[in-house]
Structure formats: structure tokens, C-alpha cells
Image (cartoon, rainbow, N blue to C red):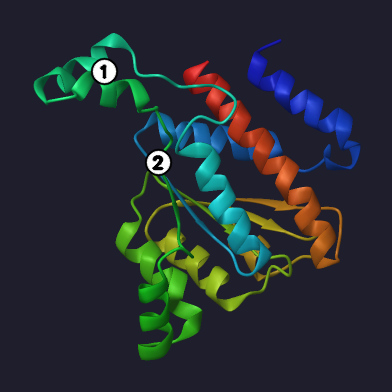
Amino acid sequence: MRTDLAIYKDLIERYPCLENVPILAAYELILESVDHGGKLLICGNGGSAADAEHIVGELMKGFKLKRQLCNEEKLPFTKVEGGIELADKLQKGIPAISLNSHLALLTAVGNDTDYDMVYAQQVYVYGSPQDVLIAMTTSGNSGNVVNAAKTAKVKGMKVIGITGSRASRLSVCSDICLQLPAVETYQIQEYTLPIYHAICAMLEERLFG
């Protein structure tokens, strides 16, 4: 069995209630995006905003692996003073941006336009057709997250929604929606973390293992 699939198998063994959630489909969609030079845009509110930051932290640097640069990638650094030492400390990454990280921009859009536009504005400017938006809202109906998903679709992006078990506005406009088997916010968030940890580990193993 491929190592990335073994990671998924371990996840389902630990959380059998997630077996019918399309986690593998979401993983393959992200992998295809990255293979074609795409990036991930990620957003959510409250605990989901913290999850967005967490996902970026796992993708942009080593998670379980060191992801060291190969000699060919280090070669251009020989042209600058201290370049070898710099290259030795750099790691390969998967491009990912947390849309809830830009405080000045969030408050400017919220004040000057509408708070429901704080993520859509960024998706419109950052987004390209090869990119993927990971949109998280436990209710599935948060206006700013749904507007980000709608804008992503207009931009030709793929959308992965992460919500609770109920049908929602986000589930309707997502290409793949991970509707987790819970309705309480904290329980949905408890399932969310092992899912994105598994996806991040699978991506890392496939791309850098």
C-alpha cells in the first residue's frame, strides 16, 4: 500500500465514523492543484480561523518530514554570501495562505465594504483557476465564508468545504464538501483537526517522501 494511503487508513481506523466523508477525494483535488502549480487559500471564523492558520503551518514547512532542499536547489544560493548556510535551513513547502491572517485588510474591508466580503475580496485578488479554496464553517452558512466560496467558483477555482452534517449554503457551492458527523460546533472542530492533519501528512509523503 502507498504510504499516503496508509496514512488515510490509519485515520479511518482511529475515527471509523469518518469513513463515508470524501477525505480522499479532497486530498486528490489538492494534490492535482499543487502538481499544476496551484496554491491553497484557506478561511474560517473563530476556531476555524485557528484551523486555517494551523493548516498553513503544516503545509509551508516540514510537518513530519524535514523537506530539505536537494543539491540542485541549493546551487543558486552559492551566489550570495552565507548562501549555503541559508539553503541548509530552508525547507520545501506547499503554497498556502490563511485569509484570516491579514488584520489591516480584514478590518479595512469590514469597515469600508461589508464584513461578509473580507474573504471574498482576497479570493478575488489572490485566486487563479488552478487554486483550491478550503472553506470552513461549522454551520455551513457563515456569510463571509460562503461568499468566498462563490467568488472562488467565479474565478474557476475548486472549493473544498468543511462543515457539520447538515446541508448548508456551503455544501451546495462546494466541489467537495466534508460534512462531518456532528452538529455541535466543538464536535465538528474535533473531527476537523485529525482530517487536515492526515491530508497534510499525505500531501507531504506524496510530494516530498
Say which residue label 1 marks.
73
Where residue 90 sits, quadrant-wise, is top left
Q: How far apart are marks 2 and 1 (CA)?
A: 17 Å
From this view, report whether residue 178 is shown above or below residue 142: above
Q: Position of residue 177 (x, y in %)?
A: 67, 52
Q: Position of residue 203 (x, y in %)?
A: 55, 29
Where residue 125 sits, quadrant-wise, is bottom left
Q: Residue furthest bottom?
A: 112
Task: Identify which residue, 131 or 81, lies in the foreground.
Answer: 81
- Circle nearer the N terminus (2, 1): 1
Residue 164 visible, this orientation: yes
Residue 165 visible, this orientation: no
State the quadrant of the N terminus: top right
81 to the left or right of 95: left
194 to the left or right of 101: right
The residue under the point 66% across, 15% down is 3
Labels in figure, total: 2
Task: Identify which residue, 41 or 19, lies in the foreground.
Answer: 41
Q: Position of residue 86 (x, y in %)?
A: 27, 26
The amino acid sitting under disc 2 is Pro
| Badge 2 element | loop
Where residue 38 sits, quadrant-wise, is top left
Task: Name the disc covering residue 27, or none.
Answer: none
Task: Identify which residue, 50 or 42, lies in the foreground.
Answer: 50
Nearer the observer, disc 2 or disc 1?
Answer: 1
Task: Identify which residue, 66 or 123, lies in the foreground.
Answer: 66
Q: Position of residue 153 (x, y in %)?
A: 45, 59
The residue under the point 33% across, 13% down is 70
Say which residue label 2 marks.
95
The residue under the point 65% across, 70% down is 169
From this view, report whether residue 129 is shown above or below residue 38: below
The amino acid sitting under disc 1 is Glu
